[in-house]
Image (spheres, grey):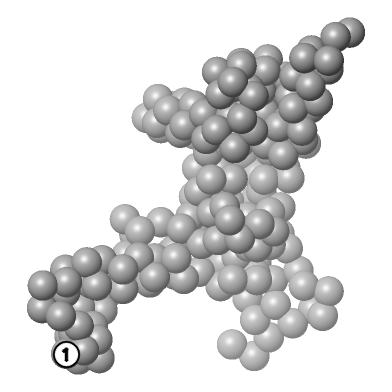
Amino acid sequence: MDKDKQDLMAKVKQLRAETGAGWMDCRKAIEEAKGDIEQARRILKAKGVQMAQKKAHRETREGLIEAYIHFSGRFGALVEVNCETDFVARTPEFKRLAQEIALQVAGMNPRYVSRDQVPEQEIHRLRQEFEETVAASVDPATQDSAWERYLERFYAESCLLDQPWVRDQTRTVRDLLTETIARLGENIVVRRFLRFELGE
């Protein structure tokens, strides 16, 4: 095997290990990126997002209810994660995703699954809080962008899908979900969760 082919195979193997994407998808991304691993990662992510968007309208009636209990026994979580078919619901990868989401809920204590679940009155309360604590210290010309950043921080703390993933802070839970949708080829939805803490 010549050096160029060895180099390509090594990069495909690395990309596959990092993303979990299929061999051919990784190879095509590496070739499209002309050997640039970082660019290939971006290509795979974009393809995953496109696939997730195409599948978003599909009905999800199968899935799993997964639990995570912290080793201390002091807190834990139950999550319902849905997919389209029982076949995918039984795969080890889908179960791993549900386990990761249960761990995330237990550890990071989100209040909502996604930003579209945040009530209008909560956004109104945040706006008042922003006006009282931040707005006075911000140049009026940049207040809109300051408010957007303030709101984004709230989403990243309070909304499960916007939270940085506990195992890799460079990715969000939404990224994890999108990548799994791209690999399994089905729409996947986090339906709901409950978090329990001793004494609460």
Q: Is residue 116 left or right of residue 199?
A: left
Q: Is residue 88 above or below residue 169?
A: above
Q: Dot 1: what SS?
A: helix
Residue 32, quarter of picture: top right
**Quadrant in the picture for the C terminus:** bottom right
| Camera sees residue 84 | no
Viewer-nearest residue: 98 or 138: 138
Viewer-nearest residue: 44 or 196: 44
Q: Is residue 157 left or right of residue 87?
A: left
The residue indicated by pointer 1 is: 136
Q: Residue 94, image x and y in percent?
A: 68, 38
| Camera sees residue 189 | yes
Viewer-nearest residue: 167 or 72: 167
Q: Residue 186, image x and y in percent?
A: 55, 27
Q: Residue at x 15, y 80 (%)?
A: 139
Q: Is residue 42 above or below residue 137?
A: above
Q: Work out which residue is located at the far right of the displayed protein and give it.
A: 1
Q: Residue at x 41, y 56 (%)?
A: 114
**Quadrant in the picture for the N terminus:** top right
Q: Is residue 15 above or below residue 197?
A: above
Dot 1: within a 10 Å radius of its alpha carbon, few (fewer than 14), some, or many (20 or more) residues? few
Q: Residue 46, image x and y in percent?
A: 47, 31
Q: Is residue 50 above or below residue 194?
A: above
Residue 154, quarter of picture: bottom left
Q: Residue at x 71, y 52 (%)?
A: 99
Q: Residue 168, image x and y in percent?
A: 66, 57
Q: Work out which residue is located at the far left of the displayed protein and give it.
A: 140
- What type is the residue that disc 1 sits on? Ala
